Amino acid sequence: MTATTRPPAPSGSSTSPRSGFTLTGRSRTLDPRTHAVRADIADVRLADRVFAPHYAAPLRRALATAATLRESRDPASAALAELPAGAAFDLLDLTGGVAWGIAVELNLVGYVDAATVRAA
């Protein structure tokens, strides 16, 4: 898949010129442990490499307390890492008391209890 620049609207057109890109080719399958992409949402920084129905810009946060980074939102799912209090976390989704994002220092994507996430 490649990204191409969209041409500006024709002159004299009533629509304003649009900037951006279009996707061509097939989306790539990326490792969800290291790339923040799910079936419903993806990190906007991956927009040139993968299609998603929605994109989110990461919000830099820090963990207020130590937390377990898990592979799914289920609290019984496998632990990917133990994150210390103060660890940087790029928040992409916060739903039902669970935060999904990227543990910055480890470059791992996963879920943590939302109560552990605070503004950086």
Image (cartoon, helix red, strand yellow):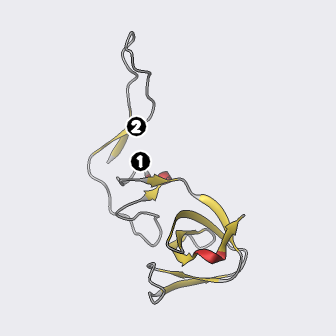
Q: Is residue 92 left or right of residue 18?
A: right
Q: As drawn, is 54 to the left or to the right of 80? A: left
Give whichever of discs 1 and 2 has the lower sequence position: 2
Of 70 and 97, nearer the camera is: 97
Q: Nearer the viewer, residue 109 or 116?
A: 116
Image coordinates of residue 21 in percent, x first then y, are: 40, 37
- Are circles 1 and 2 on residues that touch, CB within 8 Å? yes
Residue with the mark numbered 1 = 48
Q: Residue furthest bottom?
A: 76
User: How many labels, in total?
Assistant: 2
Residue appearing at x 54%, y 53% in the figure: 57
List x then y, in percent, for residue 47: 43, 50
Is label 2 in a helix, a strand or a loop?
strand
| Relative height, residue 2 to residue 31 (above, below) | above
- Res 114 quadrant in image: bottom right
- On residue 21, which mark appears? 2
68 vs 2: above or below = below
| 83 lies above or below 53 | below
